[in-house]
Image: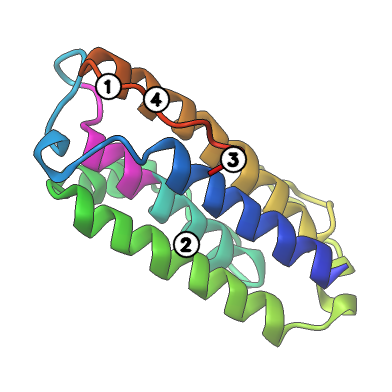
């Protein structure tokens, strides 16, 4: 199971990196509509959410539901390259947690709660994949609004 989860995580990261490959540092503060996340904010949000899943999955307190504080942190990110570095660190942290927990620990159910309550802990990797794909799609729309052609996320 852990091998399959690692492949899923690595594929999620690779697709995200490829599909956002047409965006550049000078695009960091682009937003198609005032008030929405910028390019840098979108990428930072992906990183933050990976961290959120990783921080919450084994926490006795569960997942932090202070979404206003999460958004405030994201809105301070104004550099695409810094946001991309954060994604890279978040994925590495996820890889480390995956490696450091046993198959049995990943198979145990999360406590009841609003986020995946009662599901096996390994389910967070589906959440990471789905959430990252959602923002990957938004970022390709941003790239097109900037007149760029986003690369195919599935092949180099």
Q: Name the residue under label 3.
A: 155
Q: Which of marks 2 and 4 is nearer the N terminus?
A: 2
Q: Range of the magenta residues?
A: 36-45
Q: Which of 114 and 22 is in front in this view?
A: 22
Mark-to-mark CA distance, 2 and 4? 23 Å
CB atoms of marks 3 and 4 within 8 Å: no
CB atoms of marks 2 and 3 within 8 Å: no
Mark-to-mark CA distance, 1 and 2? 29 Å
Q: Which of marks 4 and 1 is nearer the N terminus?
A: 4
Residue at 53% from the left image edge and 53% from the top image edge: 13
Q: In which quarter of the image is the N terminus?
A: bottom right
Judged from this view, the residue extending furthest toward the front is: 156
Task: Check the image and report above or below for 96 versus 43.
Answer: below
Please tell me whether mark 4 sits on a helix, a strand or a loop. helix
Q: Nearer the viewer, residue 24 or 139?
A: 24
Specify whether 77 is left or right of 153.
left
Q: Is residue 40 at all visible to an observer of this figure?
A: yes
Q: Image quarter for residue 9?
A: bottom right
Task: Check the image and report above or below for 24 versus 143.
Answer: below
Horizontal and vertical percent position of residue 58? 66, 72
Of labels 4 and 1, the one closer to you: 1
Query: Magenta region's main secondary structure?
Result: helix
Q: Name the residue under label 2.
A: 51
Residue at 30% from the left image edge and 63% from the top image edge: 85
Please tell me whether mark 2 sits on a helix, a strand or a loop. helix
Q: Image quarter for residue 33?
A: top left
Q: Which mark is residue 140?
A: 4
Residue at 37% from the left image edge and 29% from the top image edge: 139
Horizontal and vertical percent position of residue 134? 52, 30
């Amino acid at each position: 199971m852990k091998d399959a989860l690692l492949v899923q995580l690595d594929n999620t990261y690779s697709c995200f990196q490829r599909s956002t490959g047409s965006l550049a540092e000078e695009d960091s503060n682009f937003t198609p509509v005032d008030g929405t996340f910028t390019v840098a904010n979108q990428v930072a949000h992906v990183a933050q959410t990976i961290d959120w899943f990783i921080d919450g999955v084994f926490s006795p307190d569960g997942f932090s539901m202070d979404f206003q504080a999460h958004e405030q942190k994201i809105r301070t990110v104004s550099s695409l390259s810094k946001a991309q570095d954060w994604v890279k660190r978040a994925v590495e942290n996820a890889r480390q947690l995956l490696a450091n927990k046993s198959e049995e620990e990943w198979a145990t159910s999360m406590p009841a709660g609003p986020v995946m309550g009662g599901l096996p802990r390994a389910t967070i990797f589906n959440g990471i994949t789905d959430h990252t794909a959602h923002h990957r799609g938004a970022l390709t729309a941003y790239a097109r609004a900037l007149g760029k052609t986003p690369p195919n996320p599935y092949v180099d």
